[in-house]
Every structure is written in C-alpha cells, then in structure tokens.
Image (tube, rainbow, N blue to C red):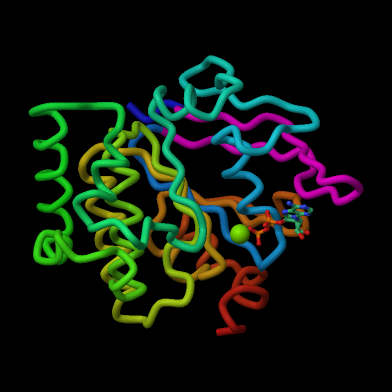
Amino acid sequence: MKDVMLQVKDLSVNYGHVEALKKINIDVKRGQITSIVGANGAGKSTLLKTISGLVKPLEGEILFEGQPIPKRAHKIVSQGIVHVPEGRRTFSGLTITDNLLVGGFLSSGKELSDNIEKQFELFPILRERKNQFAGTLSGGEQQMLAVARGLMSNPKILLLDEPSMGLAPLIVNQIYEIIQKVKDRGITVLLVEQNAKKALSICDYAYVIENGEIKLQGTGEELLNSEEVKKAYLGGK
Ligand SMILES: Nc1ncnc2c1ncn2[C@@H]1O[C@H](COP(=O)(O)OP(=O)(O)O)[C@@H](O)[C@H]1O
Ligand SMILES: [Mg+2]
C-alpha cells in the first residue's frame, strides 16, 4: 500500500528577512524514494532541517503517519525520522565501529551488535576498515559511514542531504546503489540533490524546488523527460 508517510503542508520558513521556503506542499509515500531537486540556495537543506526539528517553521505543518511531528529533535529521531546532513559529517577521531555505536544510541546489547552487522552487510568496505579512524576515509567512504550511522537509528524514513556532493561519478553510482538497497529494506527515503539526473533516475516521485517554491512535480521519468527540467537542470540535453 502506497500511503503517505510524511506530509508537508503549506510550510514556510524564514531566516530573518530571507524567505527560505514559501508555502510548500510535499507528500512522501511509504516505501518510495521521493526526490527534491533544485539549485544551490533553493531551500532543500532547510526543508530537511525543518522536518528533523533543527529549524522552526514560520507557518504550516509537517505530519508523520498522520500526526504532527514532535517539537524536539530527539523525539523526532525516536519516531523513526533520521536525517543524514549535508557534508557527510562523521566523528573523524573515532573509528568506524565507534561512529556506528554513536548512531545506535537508541539500542543496546545484542540488538546493537546485530544492527552493526546489518550495516556491514550493506557496506562491506566499512567492515574492512572498522578499526580505522573516520577522518582517514575517502569522501565516498565517509558518505557511506554517514548513511550507515543514520541507519543505526532504525529509521522509518531516511532524509538524505546531497549524498553525491563532491564525489567522483563512479563513487556516486555506488552511493546510489546503496540508496536503492535502503529502499529494498523497506525504508522510505527523502533525497535532496543538486545532481538532478541521478536523483530523478532513482526516485519514484520528485519535486523541483526554486527559490523556496515547488515549481514542478511528477514521477522521476516525467521530470527527466520534461523540457523545462532538461533546460534548467540537465545541461540542456
Ligand atoms: N542559517 C541561515 N541563516 C540565514 N540564511 C540562511 C541560513 N541557512 C540558509 N539560509 C538561506 O536560505 C536559503 C535556502 O538555503 P538552503 O536551504 O541551504 O538551500 P539549499 O540546501 O537548496 O542549497 C538560501 O538563500 C540561504 O542563503
Ligand atoms: Mg543544501
């Protein structure tokens, strides 16, 4: 059943006089990958920060499974809404295993060790390097660790902020294969990207955001074939 898991209704966010989001509406269906694509400064990160409780909205509401999301960020996480922020922030002075343990703070004992094992199945490279400090990993490996750490909180929905940013095309492909596997595990994904081509290729449904407003929406395929999207986001090809 493809019901709506997360609903953003008439959401506006301001930073002082900057109107970062202007009455936007977004539905994220259960079990799907929903993408938000748009240029730098369009409001993508603000949307994810507002969903995860880091930024307060000016108006509008966010419903998760039909209920308003809690006010506090840690309560939002414990409901199963997990945000992997832009810039793949990992704890550089901690090993990979310790980074995962930090991500797994909601569980303990066997549940925790099983959970780490589950992430190592998805990211074999992290198992190989489990005792290495996160700061010594490549950009792609750090992004994988950031996603794995997010998965340690057993999300129902994973919010991914520009997972492909700054990575070589081959590594971007690996990251996208992992996003597909996250979906295959039954986790709903809300993916924001400047990399429109990749994000539209993988998603079930997408929104184009410009200057804090939703300009277009449709299936990934519809948007990939839209002349407007081709011209503005896919290099005119
Ligand atoms: N902490 C902040 N204070 C003031 N303005 C901000 C802040 N964060 C973002 N903005 C502004 O809000 C707008 C949307 O930013 P952001 O959500 O980061 O866009 P994106 O993630 O799409 O690049 C931009 O104009 C940006 O400069
Ligand atoms: Mg951003």
Give the image quarter of residue 124: bottom left
Given residues 14 and 38, the one toward you in this image is 14
| Residue at the limit of the structure toward the top, as seen here | 67
Give the image quarter of residue 143: bottom left
Q: Is residue 7 left or right of residue 117?
A: right
- Is residue 235 depicted above or below 216 in this figure? below
How many numbered discs? 0
- Is residue 49 depicted above or below 67 in this figure? below
Given residues 8 and 141, the one toward you in this image is 141
Residue 233 appears at what percent x and percent y? 61, 73
Residue 48 appears at what percent x and percent y? 57, 44
| Residue at the limit of the structure toward the front, as seen here | 93
Residue 81 appears at what percent x and percent y? 43, 32
Q: Main secondary structure of the magenta part?
A: strand
User: Residue 13 lies in magenta, yes or no?
Assistant: yes
Q: Which residue is drawn at 67% across and 38% down?
A: 55
The quadrant of the picture showing ligand 1 is bottom right
Q: Give the magenta range.
A: 5-29
Q: Is residue 110 left or right of residue 175?
A: left
Is the C terminus in the top left, top right, bottom left or bottom right quadrant?
bottom right
User: Residue 104 lies in magenta, yes or no?
Assistant: no
Q: Is residue 173 left or right of residue 27?
A: left
Is the N terminus in the top left, top right, bottom left or bottom right quadrant?
top left
| Residue at the limit of the structure toward the right, as seen here | 17
Q: Residue at x 26, y 69 (%)?
A: 174
Residue 101 appears at what percent x and percent y? 24, 42
Given residues 94 and 147, the one toward you in this image is 94
Q: Which residue is drawn at 13% across and 53% down?
A: 120
Give the image quarter of residue 104: top left
Q: Residue at x 67, y 74 (%)?
A: 232
